[in-house]
Amino acid sequence: MQAARILTLAAVATATVALAADIAEAGEQACAAGTLGISRTIEVDTTGGPWFGAPKGDPKFLQPKEVVLTFDDGPSPANTRKILAALAKECTTATFFVVGEMVAVHPEVIKEIAEQGHTIGTHTWSHPNLARRDIDDVKHEVEATFNAAQKASPTPIAPFFRYPYLSSSDVTEDYMKSRNIGQFAVDIDSQDWRVRSAKPVVARVMAGLKARGRGIILMHDIHRSTADAVPQLLAQLKAGGYQVVQLKPKEKVDLIADVTPPEKPAHTQRARKRSKAAAGKTQRKMALRTRKPAA
């Protein structure tokens, strides 16, 4: 049974790659009638580390009814691939802000994202709050992730970056400016991490668009509920007359090749072990509570 499931998932992934590859290969050719497609591609100049998205970005960066789809924290094979399939079906694209630890485990998914014509930015190596880190930590978190993503990708990685928790400092912002890395914020936050079903994700995004009229949308491709929501969201965007804009960098990221991933402090490792043990204990308690009494 398990072997059959694995084969089925592999077949789905292969079909998704093939479908999206056809779209990418088509280049400037028109998408099929009735698909959402891409309204235009913006070549983004990241010289000087500019901001994109509220509150520091230019509010006129996008035109009315234009949206940019973005996903943080991945790649997560099953969920990311389901999102890729939905995007391919609608002949449209997104920007994926990837986490280095996830890239290191799933480099093949980065390859698929790139081959399917999407833009890849980064989101640190281990998802810390960079506003609380010194410049050396910032450098390792940022540069090691760019290196890992570029190693996995057959196409150039964009010098695009989004801060975990949307939290930056003068130190981090000055660093991004010195490295000509675009700093991405958010206009519409799906808050998909708060829920476990697709409906509220779609509802929150559409409500945000109704209020703002345009914007950079934040979602996370590590959540199954988000993967379930994307086909519904794309359908509602299309029905509402919204247009997807693709972001491409004017210049590729300038890698610093000798930067290694950050070392995890011992206290962080201990905390993660305690958290894992506590989670296992909770699961065992729940299992005992739900166990049916003997007949």
Image (cartoon, rainbow, N blue to C red):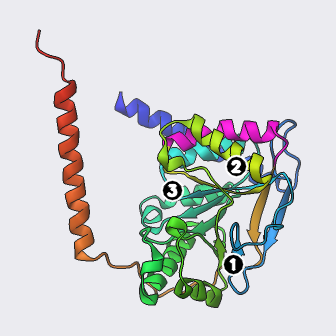
In this picture, is 51 found above or below 180? Answer: above
Q: Main secondary structure of the magenta part?
A: helix
Q: Amino acid at mark 2?
A: Gly
Q: Is residue 37 left or right of residue 225?
A: right
Q: Quadrant of the N terminus?
A: top left
Verify CB contact (< 8 Å) between mark 2 and mark 1: no
Q: Position of residue 144 (x, y in %)?
A: 47, 78
Residue nearest the observer in this picture, 121 or 57:
57
Q: Residues within 10 Å of mark 2 (few under 14, many from 20)?
A: some
Q: Secondary structure at mark 2?
A: helix
Q: Is residue 14 something one can see in this rendering? A: no
- The residue located at (58%, 69%) in the rendering is 162
Q: Secondary structure at mark 3?
A: loop
State the residue lying farthest toward the left: 294
In the image, is residue 233 part of the stretch drawn in magenta?
yes
Q: Position of residue 281 (x, y in %)?
A: 17, 44
Give the distance between the C-alpha atoms of the residues marked 2 and 1, in whole angstroms.
32 Å
- The residue located at (49%, 65%) in the rendering is 99
Residue stretch rendered in magenta on the structure: 224-242
- The residue located at (43%, 89%) in the rendering is 136
Give the distance between the C-alpha atoms of the residues marked 3 and 1, in whole angstroms.
21 Å
Q: Quadrant of the C terminus?
A: top left
In this picture, is 160 found above or below 33? Answer: below
Residue located beneath label 1 in the image: 252
Of the numbered discs in the image, which one, if any, rests on residue 208? 2
Residue nearest the observer in this picture, 164 or 255:
164
User: Which comes sooner in the sequence, label 2 or label 3?
Assistant: 3
Q: Amino acid at mark 1?
A: Lys
State the residue lying farthest toward the top: 295
